[in-house]
């Protein structure tokens, strides 16, 4: 399949046309960003681990009945995906209090919530991805009611599946961000990526962070954390 022109370059990925108008090529970058790209760095190997981890998790979710845009991993940094129109909404599912939730509400960090908290954010870097309500999404035309209902159901299903998966690997799934898009038939599919860039993972025994928080908080050994997630998922020593 031939690669066409560059359609989009974001903080962590590039997106290219292919010879099939319904399929895109995604290239994962080695860039690290935090705080809406106010903090930046390059880390050799980071793109590879996000490619491997995201492909593995999308495939696992597909086996559990969760459809996504993911089609195939081509190599260590490239994937083929279905072309979708990304909804301008980011969905965050929280199981334990940390990060912006604690800063925004003044709640104690590390509290296990009695049930998952689902939050919507407007996907807009210039505005700092503000928290929004369902009514905002409906009234401003960012999503339809049936799409919001589907997104919430899918997000909670993904949370249940991945919580069990990661707990079996000695990892606590603290929270994570999901994105969704409409395909050519109007179906809403899970999209973007699922990786240490978009999830918070804590080692279940030590509480050690195994995600991008190591970059955000200057904890060091960022690549080692990504490598550890891939090692536990795949069972491969690297």
Image (spheres, rainbow, N blue to C red):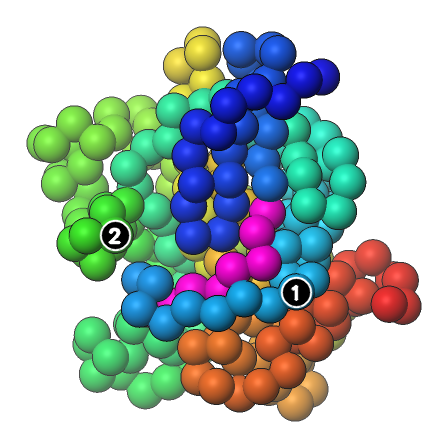
The residue lying at 70 percent from left, 54 percent from top is 48
Where, by quadrant of the figure, is residue 173 drawn?
A: bottom right
Q: Nearer the viewer, residue 206 or 2?
A: 2
Query: Residue at horizontal 72%, vertical 50%?
Result: 52
Q: Tag 2's secondary structure?
A: helix
**Residue at figure coordinates x 16%, y 32% from the top left:** 138
Residue located beneath label 2 in the image: 125
Task: Indicate left or right for 224 with 222 as reference.
Answer: right
Task: Pinpoint residue 199: horizontal percent, then vertical percent.
Answer: 52, 62
Q: Determine if the magenta segment contains residue 225.
A: no
Q: Residue furthest left?
A: 139
In the image, 30 versus 235, the foreground residue is 30
Q: In the image, 232: left or right of 10? A: right
> In the visual, does 48 lie left or right of 232?
left
| Residue drawn at the location 43% of the way across and 52% of the way down | 11
The magenta segment is: 28-35
Residue 190, relative to residue 144: is it above or below?
below
SS at mark 1? loop
* Residue 139 figure quarter: top left
Instruction: Residue 105 in the image: state x and y as whole percent.
Output: 20, 76
Q: Find the distance from the CA under tag 2 to the CA under tag 1.
A: 25 Å
Mark 2 Cα within 10 Å, few/some/many (few <14, many 20+)? few
């Amino acid at each position: 399949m031939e690669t066409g022109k560059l359609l989009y370059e974001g903080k962590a990925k590039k997106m290219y046309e292919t010879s099939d108008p319904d399929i895109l090529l995604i290239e994962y970058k080695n860039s690290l960003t935090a705080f809406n790209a106010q903090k930046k760095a390059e880390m050799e190997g980071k793109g590879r681990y996000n490619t491997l981890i995201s492909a593995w998790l999308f495939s696992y979710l597909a086996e559990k009945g969760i459809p996504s845009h993911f089609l195939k991993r081509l190599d260590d940094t490239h994937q083929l995906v279905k072309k979708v129109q990304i909804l301008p909404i980011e969905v965050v599912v929280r199981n334990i209090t940390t990060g912006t939730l604690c800063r925004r509400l003044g709640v104690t960090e590390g509290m296990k919530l009695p049930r998952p908290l689902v939050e919507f954010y407007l996907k807009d870097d210039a505005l700092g991805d503000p928290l929004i309500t369902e009514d905002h999404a409906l009234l401003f035309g960012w999503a339809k009611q049936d799409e919001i209902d589907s997104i919430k159901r899918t997000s909670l299903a993904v949370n249940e599946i991945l919580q069990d998966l990661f707990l079996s690997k000695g990892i606590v799934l603290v929270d994570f961000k999901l994105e969704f898009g409409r395909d050519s038939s109007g179906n809403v599919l899970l999209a973007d990526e699922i990786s240490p860039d978009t999830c918070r993972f804590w080692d279940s025994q030590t509480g050690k962070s195994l995600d991008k928080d190591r970059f955000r908080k200057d904890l060091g050994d960022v690549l080692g954390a990504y490598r550890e997630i891939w090692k536990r998922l795949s069972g491969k020593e690297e």
